[in-house]
């Protein structure tokens, strides 16, 4: 209605045009498949600190430069002939899910949804499990990620590396458990770079119903790939560790795992890292 008020009182007035009714305006707006842009609410800690005066302008400038370097690096990876995937844990799903108001107050089962997206083909791979099978620990994410990577081997002839881009969540990807599992595999060179689901009017009775909802979200060129997993699928990787830590520093004040920006895994078991995207 704010947009319609602007259209009626400003745009039409300045041009001497008779405005459409609010109903017709809304109908045309929908027919053209446009919508109002909503700014993202997520904000990193450094940007928030600068907004509230707890970070200097120089430190903020350095942070923004790093952000731009990361965006350029992600773009160059995408346009080059490499296998590039992004991945993240999606919003928590609840079961049961229904339009009946009485069910709203009933105890619900938490359903987790980890998604991997192919930047080249736009294919989506979903892994769904509920809280009675496993939780959200390093073992669960290590099992999913390494199983997915092995399913993509051998790499196409045009690609000499597989790149995974993600947020820097330590329990999801920036942890010793996952690094150990990558080093234990006889694979080509790895490089790890740190940086959709329509459920409207659908009734979910059991967690497996989310699998059908995900697959039916797209038909062309083919449905989304979805795997519903249980406790037998997950492995306990943290019981056999080659590396006890992936922290780049050892003493107080030296870099920690949250300072890592890129990890590259080599077939000989070595791990190379970067603390800045501009570094070699």
Image (tube, rainbow, N blue to C red):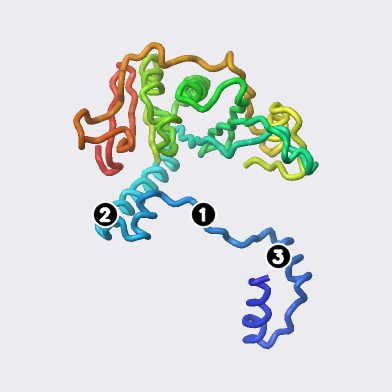
Label 1: element kind? loop
Res. 195 in view: yes
Dot 1 crowding, Cα within 10 Å, few <14, some 14–19, many 20+: few
User: Residue drawn at (60%, 20%), measured in percent from left and top?
Assistant: 133
Residue 48, quarter of picture: bottom left
Which residue is tagged 1? 40
The answer to which of 153 and 135 lies nearer the viewer is 135
- Of the residues tagged 1 and 3, which is closer to the observer? 1
Within 10 Å of disc 2 (Cα), the crowding (few <14, some 14-19, many 20+) is few
The image position of residue 73, as x and y in percent, is 37, 44
- Residue 139 in picture, x, y percent from top left: 47, 21
Snapshot quadrant of residue 59: bottom left
Q: In this view, does 248 lie to the left or right of 207?
A: left
Instruction: Locate residue 174: give its quadrant.
Output: top left
Tell me which residue sits at (42%, 35%) in the image: 169
Q: What element carries label 3?
A: helix
Left/right of residue 160 with respect to residue 29 in the rendered view:
left
The answer to which of 273 and 78 lies nearer the viewer is: 273
Query: Which badge, 1 or 2, comes first in the chain's sequence?
Result: 1
- The alpha-carbon separation of the residues under discs 1 and 2 comes to 23 Å
Residue position for label 3: 29
Distance of label 1 from label 3 (alpha carbons): 22 Å
Residues tagged 1 and 3 counted as in contact (Cβ below 8 A): no
Taking the image as drawn, is residue 215 in sight? no
Q: In which quarter of the image is the N terminus?
A: bottom right
Horizontal and vertical percent for residue 23?
Answer: 78, 70
The disc, 3 or 2, on the residue closer to the chain's N-terminal end is: 3
Q: Residues within 10 Å of mark 3 (few under 14, many from 20)?
A: few
Please report contact status of discs 3 and 2: CB closer than 8 Å, yes or no: no
The residue that label 2 is drawn on is 59
Identify the residue at image location x=25%, y=37%: 280
266 with respect to 92 (left or right): left
């Amino acid at each position: 209605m704010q947009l319609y008020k602007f259209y009626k009182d400003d745009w039409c007035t300045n041009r001497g045009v008779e405005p459409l009714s609010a109903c017709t305006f809304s109908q045309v707006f929908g027919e053209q498949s446009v919508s109002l842009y909503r700014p993202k609410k997520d904000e990193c800690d450094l940007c928030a600190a600068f907004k509230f005066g707890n970070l200097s302008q120089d430190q903020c400038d350095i942070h923004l430069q790093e952000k731009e370097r990361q965006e350029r690096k992600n773009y160059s990876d995408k346009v080059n002939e490499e296998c590039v995937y992004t991945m993240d844990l999606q919003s928590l799903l609840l079961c049961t899910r229904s339009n009946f108001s009485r069910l709203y107050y009933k105890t619900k089962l938490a359903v987790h949804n980890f998604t991997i997206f192919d930047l080249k083909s736009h294919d989506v791979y979903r892994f769904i499990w509920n809280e009675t099978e496993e939780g959200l620990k390093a073992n669960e994410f290590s099992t999913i990620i390494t199983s997915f990577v092995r399913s993509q081997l051998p790499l196409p002839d045009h690609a000499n590396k597989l790149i995974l881009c993600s947020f820097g969540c330590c329990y999801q990807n920036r942890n010793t458990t996952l690094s150990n599992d990558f080093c234990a595999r006889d694979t080509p060179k790895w490089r790890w770079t740190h940086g959709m689901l329509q459920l409207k009017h659908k009734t979910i009775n059991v967690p497996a119903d989310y699998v059908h909802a995900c697959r039916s979200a797209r038909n062309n060129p083919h449905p989304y790939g979805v795997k519903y997993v249980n406790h037998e699928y997950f492995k306990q990787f943290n019981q056999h560790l080659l590396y006890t830590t992936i922290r780049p520093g050892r003493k107080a004040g030296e870099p920690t795992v949250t300072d890592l920006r890129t990890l590259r895994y080599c077939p000989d078991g070595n791990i190379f890292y970067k603390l800045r995207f501009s570094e070699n």
